[in-house]
Amino acid sequence: MKHVFFLLAIAGGCLAFPAPSRAQTFAHEQSSTYVWPREPEVRRQLYRWQNLKFGMLIHWGLYSQLGIVESWSICSEEEEWIPRDSTVSYDAYKRAYWATIDAFKPERFDPLAWARAGKRGGMNYVVFTTKHHDGFALFDTRQSDFSILHGAFKDDPRANATREVFNAFRQEGYMIGAYFSKPDWHSPYYWWDRYATPNRNKNYSIAKNPWRWEKFKEFTYNQIEELVNGDYGKVDILWLDGGWVCPQRGSRREGQDIDMPRIAAMARGYQPGILIVDRTVEGEFENYQTPERGVPPGRLTEPWESCIPLGNDWGYVPSDVYKSPARVIHTLVEIVAKGGNLLLGIGPKADGTLPDEVVERLEKVGEWLAVNGKAIYDTRSVHAFRDGNTWFTAGEEGAILYAIACLEEGEALPREVSWRGNVPPPGSRVTCLQTGKTARWKKGSDGLVTVTLPAGLPAGLPAVAFSWPSPGAND
């Protein structure tokens, strides 16, 4: 198969990146066990987060300048979703990638525009990549010179991008999350230049080089402390990626223990109640689970969030194909009905603006949520959460039950929708959220509930939501 190549000027030359033939397929599933947090403040924060339902995950960095899959091209693993110029040696490629710090200059950087686009889209919390696996920090760190404040953007008053993003999103009422990569491929304490870097893991033996690993632990602790010590205001979520950096589990290779109890104690000393999400590392520091690029098959009772990109890739890629608003809405409905949140991945362009396609899709999603959001926000899952393409949620106290009928894209609106289970009590007033008016309904002798759609519904509506009083619905 032919590949399309992007030619990118870097450090006076250029690298060619073959576009992957299909979407990235690597994904993390949720952990198999869950430990509820003991701290009352953390549990209250978790409850608040569960009510928000819809958030924005922002990947932005050097890879945005290059228009490629985030960070992974400098990892010497051979995967279809990690494109790399085959005419350039691996070491030369890495050097060219690092040199992108001298080209990344987002002169149109406007995080308030990002926050407002997300708010119009119905989003309520944000998780921003303060540092991805490549080690490029988008905040003012004293632990490394490999940061946005030492590159081409250093003289701009907005150079501390993390501060700008957090302040902008906080101004718009979001819960604030800091994405932080535990592995750091730029740090000599993780990828030591004495050895080759064959994969995503540290490239030396900790047992033989304990001093070096201790330096990495301090490096990681200090960078996280910089993010949570109050210089960036209130941080609600510490979202830690790179689950392979963890204590040894079972018979797997040498563990990579960074002392999470010490990090968590420090973080909560500065930010009481902060949610700590040590992704895929089961235990007390995974306050909610994060299945990636997919939705669990059934209802889950523990806190969880599916992180799914709006396009095929997390960061900005010029050729990306974005999901339709209807698909986003259908995914959000399914996730919420199963008891979770949706964290939708957004990739700003290198100049600091959002792609037009992203803004347009968020606006369409937000239009539906502005009218039907009562069936999504502040709701909880019910035992009978689905019948065919109809999904069910309940108000927190179980007094209101919602049915959300997802409609096929591109098809005319049906005259009726039907489902089994979750039958309104006799004589109940069933309200169509889209119109605010009572909808006619009946229950057949076979238990089938049939609701007549009100006249005047917008063409192309992705889903229709109904509500009715239902004491004890959330048993």
Image (tube, helix red, strand yellow):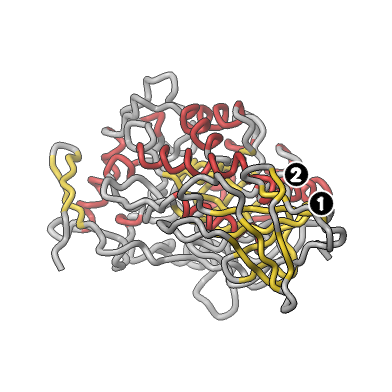
Residue situated in front as seen by the camera: 291 or 119: 119
Q: Position of residue 102 (x, y in %)?
A: 27, 33
Picture residue at 52% right of the left edge, 32% below the top: 115
Residue situated in front as seen by the camera: 372 or 233: 372
Q: Earlier in the sequence, mark 2 or mark 1?
A: 1
Residue 273 disc label? 2
Q: Position of residue 373 (x, y in %)?
A: 64, 45
Q: Amino acid at mark 1?
A: Glu
Residue situated in front as seen by the camera: 459 or 273: 459
Q: Position of residue 235 (x, y in %)?
A: 64, 37
From the viewer's perspective, is 59 left or right of 284? left
Label 1: state its secondary structure. Answer: loop
* Vertical placement of residue 147 versus 154, above or below: below
Query: In the picture, which quadrant includes the C terminus?
Result: bottom right
Picture residue at 41% right of the left edge, 51% below the top: 324
Residue labelled with disc 1: 39
Q: Position of residue 184 (x, y in %)?
A: 44, 51
Total marks placed: 2
Instruction: Calculate the distance from the C-alpha at mark 2 to the C-alpha at mark 1.
Output: 8 Å
* Vertical placement of residue 370 versus 325, above or below: above
| Residue 286 visible in the shown view | no
Picture residue at 50% right of the left edge, 50% below the top: 461
Residue sitting at the far right: 471
* Vertical placement of residue 87 versus 222, above or below: below
